[in-house]
Amino acid sequence: MTSLLASGTAALPKVAIIADPHVHDTSFRPHGAREDFASVRTLADTVASTRVFNESSHALRAALDDVAARNIRLVVIVGDLLDDGQTFNRAAALALLRDYTTRYGMRFFATPGNHDLFALAGRHMGKRFLNTDGTHILVTSDRDASRGRSAGRIVTEAAFCDGYTDALPDMAELGYFRRDTDLLWECPFGGSDALADRTYEVRSDDGLTEAQMIDASYLVEPVEGLWILSLDANIYKPRSGGDEGFVDRSEAGWNAMLTDKPFLLSWAGDVARRAAALNKRLLVFSHYPVIGPLSTTLDDEVRLFGRTAFARRMPRPAVAEAFAEAGIGVHFSGHWHVNETALLRRGGAFLVNVAVPSLTAFPAAYKIATFEETSLSVETVSLRDVPGFDAAFPAYGVEARRRGMDFGGILQTRSYPEFLSRHLAQLVRHRYLPREWPEDFADAVHGLTVGDLFRLAGGETGTNSRAMPESVLTLPFIEMVADWYRLRKGRQLALDEIPDERLAAYRTLMSRYAAGAWEPASIQFRLAGFLRMLGQYLASPPSRDFTVDLETGEIRDGASAYFGRTDLRQTGRG
């Protein structure tokens, strides 16, 4: 196996790694809007979305303020810088980043996410923004779009999502093009950074239509000894049947890359070999994970919920194996808004995927990567203090009163972590249960308590349930489901938000249900699967602060080491 170490190199600067900031500019006022107009997304849309909207710029500023305070000057953004690629949001995001470049000398390196641009020519976008009376108005780039249930409609080109042709040159300073100060810059097609020289052929699934598509991948050496490799994992293909336009293959992630962009991994492997030979440290990232967040729980996921969109989008074992064989070693990703570390071993090769959580979803955090003599150290920094996160609360309050809803008390939160935790609880009610859970199981969630789960396990009179605090036994099961999602998305970071007595009860329930022999048609059978998944979330590799040995792939969390207890299951072979 080729060594991933760059021996004898001088100390390299730390690199901050940010995922999915999804910048939305609430100050945008389209032509024709009233003087009191603000581009504030509705709270109803927010609690049904996997991310928050109006708080995004405040969160990104808070993260970059912390980065600046730590004297870090290199910042990687692993995709989805923008809300949905709108040109007004791109202008706001770039202005924000340039402010930190001007004040602190920060340099940013990005990869395109599925929310940053679309194909070559782009696509229309439309969003609902709040009026001062709590109703909403549609702001869209599409003149043919109906206003639907909105009170009005504004058409503006600024809401359009550009494609590669226009978006990439506008974001040139994010690493996509060469700088005179770079010690090295190249792309999969050579040394030219001209977009005309960075294209590949794509075909529709029926093979009848061909097109040239741009790939935005690049390798850059901004400082001596550090190579930063950005892999563009977006796939856009012409529609079948001769129809105009393109199909977004982002749902497939790296699964589509192996077939539609085979040149990219070959180039990445060549970069890894050259980095080792030249004693360079290599930091690799793309928008999509190469080992799925459900890699250890996929069987239970499918049994419990069916083949959900989440399950269908998981990278196949072949993806991780190809990366490991290419000698990548460590890969940073975003997209799924989760905090997770996943490990694969195959013979003498290994692959660690570090999933970086979004700044706009629970648990908001960013990572810091530090190359040491024989290892890569990863620190996770949670966003605790976000000034201005509640700026939209007055508008939310008007909307809530008009709708006659309190949105789970989300407007009473006093910190950004609490706001996001409450948002996730609302997401369980408004999205996950109605969309992803079987109807009968979702109905049961609303009628049970944690104490009921003990009784269903045969523990009504057992010592374990009697020892539990009354506050835990009377806890509605839906609150436990919210904790389950907190652990699913946050792993170790979620432990900060869940009381110890709840975790103790959950562990006892895990043991109770694991010991039972349940009929497949019973609710206990489903609960056992639910709890097995919870156990996997709690037992996953270190995901807060850890170190990866670049020779062995060993992951160390303090004094303990993680050698890949679930390697086989992570690739579907266990």
Image: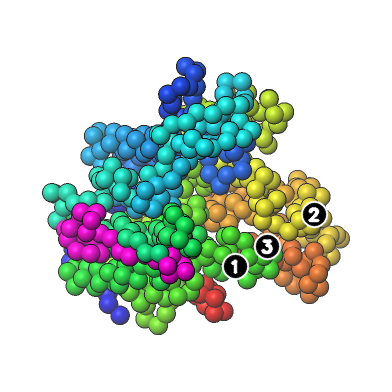
Point 79% across, 65% down: residue: 524
Say which quadrant the C terminus sits in: bottom right
- What percent of the width, then of the height, locates residue 314? 52, 65
Residue that mark 3 sits on: 305
| Foreground of the two, 137 or 114 | 137
Looking at this view, name the residue that lies furthest to the right.
Answer: 461
**Residue 535 shown left or right of residue 2 in the figure:** right
Answer with the quarter of the image where residue 68 lies: top left
Q: Earlier in the sequence, mark 2 or mark 3?
A: 3
- The quadrant where residue 442 appears: bottom right
152 and 291: which is toward the camera: 152
Q: Give, as a single range, the part of the protein colored magenta.
A: 184-208
Disc assigned to residue 444:
2
Return the residue at label 1.
297
Q: Is residue 232 left or right of residue 307?
A: left
Disc number lying in front (3 or 1):
3
Residue 381 image offset from top left, x and y in percent: 42, 47
Q: Secondary structure at mark 1?
A: loop
